[in-house]
Image (tube, rainbow, N blue to C red):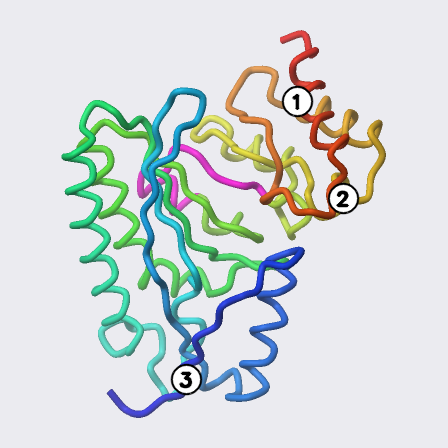
Amino acid sequence: FPAVPVGLVQAVFDRDDRVALGQALQVVSETFGVEHLAFAGEVVLAVLKELAGRAVQGQGYVSAQFVASVGHGFGDDPSNHPGAAILNHLSDFFYEYSRRYFEATRGVLDIFFMGDDFGIQTGPMMSLTMFRRFMVTHLKRLYGLAKEYDLLVMMHSCGSVRALIPDMIDAGMDMLDPVQVRAASMEPERLKRDFGRDITFHGSIDTQQTLPRGSVKDVEDEVRSRLELFEDGGFICCGSQDYMIDIPAENLLTIYRTCGSAEM
């Protein structure tokens, strides 16, 4: 491939990974120039988690945004882009790793959890055209493997990903995590209206404002509004991100106390 600057960025998750990632992208953009940034790099990890007696096979990531620009005339054609080779290699590795994992744990797992942050606070990290040409094929392949083992597919993506949800549903996604409600176009009411028939939403209790800065009543009100919105199901109540140290313990407990006392 022609020489092209490649920025490998690992966000520091000190308080809010969206903020940290945004700052990192700004540094890379100013250093290389947006038009030259073809940034890739993912380290695939696999974990087995027990959630209330149900097993989840998961993919974690360290730095996960692929092909964030179209520098040096590569355009959005995956056959002519250096990021495509990286994606193909990672997809092949993770497919085979997961296949072996599914075989070894057949009958134990219920959910295939995988993640890749495709969104930032204001919108998707790449155009819909690029997402479809570079990412959807790999998602379909991995989701399809999970379906062969009768697993539900939970997809993690932070940020504003509303524009990408239809394609992820078509690829086979069953659940979206974590529903970052402060991001653009991620209002729960709209997501429920447009996609509630097709997928389950995991998350959405606001970790950017309500939980760290709100009162107990603020948390109660948000939880109750979400339970009312999803009174017919399709919702798992938890935070819109990981719980950070700046969230008062009482606010965290309020989420589960409110859920436990709700009349369903």
Q: Is residue 86 left or right of residue 62?
A: left
Q: Inspect the magenta stretch and tell me whether residue 237 lies in it.
A: no
Farthest-out residue, top = 263
Q: Is residue 49 left or right of residue 85?
A: right
Q: Residue at x 52, y 82 (%)?
A: 34
* Residue placed most toward the observer, 35 or 86: 86
Number of the front mark, 2 or 3: 2
Q: Mark 2 and mark 3: span between their CA atoms? A: 39 Å
Residue placed under numbered mark 1 in the picture: 256
Number of the front mark, 3 or 1: 1
Residue placed under numbered mark 3 in the picture: 71
Q: Element under label 2?
A: helix
The tally of labels here is 3
Q: Residue at x 34, y 43 (%)?
A: 47
Q: Residue at x 47, y 56 (%)?
A: 117
Q: Which amino acid, by three-letter code, is at mark 3?
A: Gly
Disc on the earlier residue, 3 or 1: 3
Give residue 226's quadrant in the image.
Answer: top right
Q: Does residue 205 sit above or below 207 in this rendering?
A: above
Q: Which segment did they paint magenta?
A: 166-179
Give residue 143's quadrant in the image.
Answer: top left
